[in-house]
């Protein structure tokens, strides 16, 4: 599809990556596909919280996000934070939902539909 997906009523731009992170370092992304109009910059926000920023890229009405965990002892949340950023959160699946650092090849996909 040359980097642009097709869906019933239109197309979308896509960003697919594997995120790794240790200590309080910013996540590093192994980008598998990026047809967005720029590169997402990943930063460390707080324990277990990360932001992916690309100015003006994420229309809340047209952006789909998906996260696929590799560590089933943790739970994840990912959503459009605002027009400029995506928020990713990681917590232990311990019943208390304790925030925790450290990502290992966390699979994410962001689609921005036309």
Image: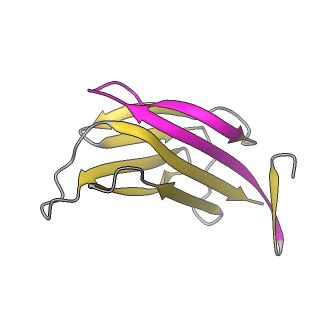
Residue at the extreme right of the image, as rendered: 2
**Figure quadrant of residue 44:** top left
Instruction: Locate residue 2, reporting x and y percent.
Output: 87, 46
Vertical comparison of 27 with 96: above or below: above
Instruction: Locate residue 40, reporting x and y percent.
Output: 58, 35
Residue at the extreme left of the image, as rendered: 96
The span picked out in magenta is 10-33
Vertical comparison of 88 with 32: above or below: below
Vertical comparison of 71 with 23: above or below: below
Which residue: 23% across, 39% down? 47
Q: How is the image coloured?
A: secondary structure
Q: Is residue 15 left or right of residue 22?
A: right
> Is 36 in front, or is 30?
30
Instruction: Locate residue 35, reporting x and y percent.
Output: 76, 42
Q: Is residue 13 left or right of residue 69?
A: right
> Is 73 in front, or is 33?
73
Which residue: 41% across, 50% down? 70
Residue 31 belongs to magenta span = yes
Instruction: Locate residue 1, reporting x and y percent.
Output: 87, 52
**Figure quadrant of residue 34:** top right
The dominant secondary structure in magenta is strand
């Amino acid at each position: 599809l040359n980097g642009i997906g097709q869906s019933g009523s239109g197309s979308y731009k896509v960003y697919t990556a594997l995120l790794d992170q240790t200590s309080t370092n910013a996540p590093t992304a192994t980008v598998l596909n990026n047809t967005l109009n720029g590169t997402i910059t990943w930063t460390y926000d707080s324990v277990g919280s990360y932001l992916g920023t690309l100015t003006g890229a994420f229309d809340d009405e047209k952006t789909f996000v998906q996260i696929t965990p590799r560590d089933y002892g943790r739970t994840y949340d990912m959503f459009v934070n605002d027009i400029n950023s995506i928020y990713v959160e990681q917590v232990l699946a311990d019943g208390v939902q304790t925030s925790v650092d450290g990502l290992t090849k966390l699979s994410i996909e962001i689609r921005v539909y036309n």
